[in-house]
Amino acid sequence: MKDNIKRETSCPLWIAIIVGIIFLGWIYAVANSAGWIHSFDQALISTLASKNASAISFAQHFTVLANTKVMVVLTTLAAIIFWLCKQHNAA
């Protein structure tokens, strides 16, 4: 009977080990202030940074939605809507 059981966890385990090793290497580099970390950060920042004034304005207004007060209000509204629609598990 055991011959029919497939081991489907071997691939995800190897992936997890590889990602874990990369993550530990990254932690070690950051903890020891490796020079390439600063260069990598600056390259990433310059790639992602926008010089477009309208994009910056949009991002500043959009990030207000992540404030704690706004999130509490949105979560409360979602819970009330789910409760009123009889979706008690979602609320």
Image: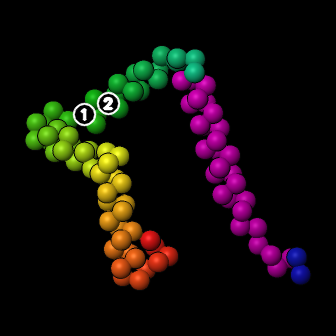
- Residue that lies at the very extreme toward the left in this rendered image: 54
Q: Residue 14 shows which numbered tag?
A: none
Q: What element carries label 1?
A: loop
Please tell me which residue is depicted at 17% across the width and 38% down the height of the picture: 56
Q: In which quarter of the image is the N terminus?
A: bottom right
Q: What residue type is labelled 2?
A: Ile
Give the residues in magenta: 3-30
Residue 20 appears left or right of 55: right
Q: Does the magenta stretch include residue 44?
A: no
Please tell me which residue is depicted at 71% across the width and 67% down the height of the picture: 8
Residue 5 appears left or right of 63: right
Q: Nearer the viewer, residue 74 or 35?
A: 74
Kindly indicate the quadrant of the structure image that contains residue 61: top left
Q: How far apart in space, not on screen, are marks 1 and 2 (Cα)?
A: 6 Å
Q: Estimate the x, y position of residue 73 in percent, counting from the top left.
A: 31, 57
Looking at the image, residue 46 lies above or below residue 12: above
- Residue that lies at the very extreme toward the right in this rendered image: 1
10 Å crowding of disc 1: few (<14), some (14-19), many (20+): few
Residue 83 appears left or right of 32: left
Q: What residue type is labelled 1?
A: Ala
Question: Which residue position holds label 1?
Answer: 49
Dominant SS in magenta:
helix
Q: Nearer the viewer, residue 3 or 69?
A: 69
Q: Does the magenta stretch include residue 16?
A: yes
Are circles 1 and 2 on residues that touch, CB within 8 Å?
Answer: yes
Please tell me which residue is depicted at 46% across the width and 73% down the height of the picture: 90
Q: What element carries label 2?
A: helix
Q: Estimate the x, y position of residue 71 in percent, counting from the top left.
A: 34, 53
10 Å crowding of disc 2: few (<14), some (14-19), many (20+): few
Q: Nearer the viewer, residue 83 or 64?
A: 83
Q: How many labels does the image show?
A: 2
Q: Residue 45 shows which numbered tag?
A: 2
